[in-house]
Image: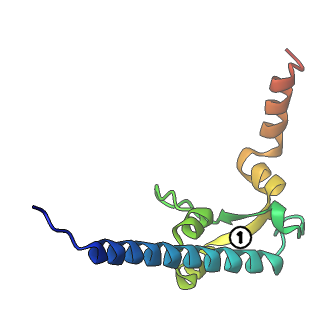
Amino acid sequence: MLVTNPNAYKARDMQHLERKLTRYRAKARARAYVQEYLCYHSCVDCGEDVVGLLTFDHLKKRNGAKTTISDLVGQGVSIKRLRIEIAKCVVRCEDCHRDKHCGAKGRNAAMKALMGVGT
């Protein structure tokens, strides 16, 4: 007959819940830090300051690294780690970010192609 200790299961479940709560709190702290950072910064190109429209744009290519600020927040990294990564970025609004990477001409050409203008 197999005898199990129900308290062992409870202890394991409590440890799991504590780890989950710790991760949740870390993510919440990281999210709050990023939101506060964006409250005090505006787009470097046009001056837009609506937090919901602002993004982080890395200044240099990251040699294959795919980590974004959003990924780091989702991982619940420390504020120190966020500061290091944010220091490598500038704040841009979504429109200026798109224009920088696609170019205004590229974006207009893509829109015309989607709308069937000039074909």
Q: Nearer the viewer, residue 101 or 13?
A: 13
- Quarter residue 87 falls in: bottom right
Instruction: Residue at the far front: name it.
Output: 1
Q: Which of 31 and 9 is in front in this view?
A: 9
Compared across the picture, whether 116 is left or right of 66 comes to right
Q: Whole-percent x and y of residue 93?
A: 81, 61
> Measured along the vertical axis of the image, is residue 101 above or below residue 28?
above
Let me know if residue 77 appears in the view: no
- Quarter residue 14 falls in: bottom left
Q: Whole-percent x and y of residue 64?
A: 46, 55
Instruction: Residue at the far top: name it.
Output: 119
Let me know if residue 101 appears in the view: yes
x 58%, y 79%: residue? 25
- Quarter residue 1 falls in: bottom left
Q: Mark 1: give few (<14), some (14-19) or many (20+) Cα within 10 Å.
A: some
Q: Where the C terminus falls, by quadrant? A: top right
x 71%, y 50%: residue? 101
The amino acid type found where label 1 is placed reads: Val
Q: Whole-percent x and y of residue 110?
A: 79, 31
User: Label 1 belongs to which residue?
Assistant: 90
What colour scheme governs how the chains and residues are painted in the rendered image of this protein?
rainbow
Compared across the picture, whether 84 is left or right of 52 comes to left
Q: What element carries label 1?
A: strand
x 59%, y 73%: residue? 27
x 52%, y 68%: residue? 75
Instruction: Residue at the far bottom: name it.
Output: 80
